Amino acid sequence: MRIAAAAACLLIPAAIAGPAATEPPRSRTIYIAAIEPKGGTHVDQEPFPDKPLPPGGGYALKKPDEKGRWEVSTYRWDPGTIVVNQGDRVTLEIVGINGDQHPFTIEGYWISDVVRRGQLTRVSFTADKAGIFKIICRKHAPAMQADLVVLERK
Ligand SMILES: [Cu+2]
């Protein structure tokens, strides 16, 4: 009885696996921007944070200037989640808006290239592996990551 219950539990993850591809493979172009959201205020309104942000280039915390204004910023891929179906022919068209350059790798597909400000970088591939793959900027760790979600074709 106890063994049967344990076996049933082991079967559940397969039964509740994520969403699957529901349409035939097609070509998709996804438009992405490398951006740098920023915020700032004055020490009279909000004190400068007493804890540093993680190192790696993905976050920047500027100390108060001579007038007491301080700023925080991060680098992002926009959008941060990209969903395609397994078998799709995918083109990522990435424009550099903020930051001089973004050397990046798509984990699992092992595609690497560089995005430069004011330029388009296009990478094309067939999404033949299902799963969730990080698009990582190696210059702005840990924050500048997006998820490429490839829905399994069953
Ligand atoms: Cu970057």
Image (tube, rainbow, N blue to C red):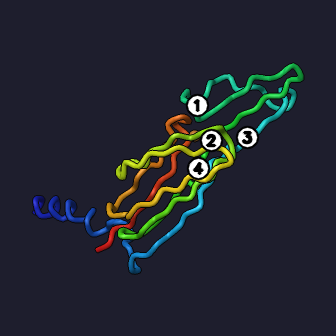
Quarter of the view holding residue 20: bottom left
Q: Is residue 111 rendered to the left or right of residue 45?
A: left
Q: Vertical placement of 132 versus 101: above or below? A: below
Between disc 3 and disc 4, the foreground one is: 4
Q: Vertical placement of 145 versus 23: above or below? A: above
Residue denoted by label 4 = 77
Q: Residue at coordinates 54% horizontally, 29% vertically from top-left?
A: 56
The reply to whether callout 2 and callout 3 are in contact (CB within 8 Å) is no
- Residue 23's disc is none
The reply to whether callout 1 and callout 2 are in contact (CB within 8 Å) is yes
Residue denoted by label 2 = 75
Q: Give the camera-side residue of 59 and 42.
A: 59
Q: Is mark 2 within 8 Å of ligand 1?
A: yes
- Residue 38's disc is 3
Q: Is residue 48 rendered to the left or right of residue 129?
A: right
Tag 1: Cα neighbours inside 10 Å, few (<14), some, or many (≥20)?
some
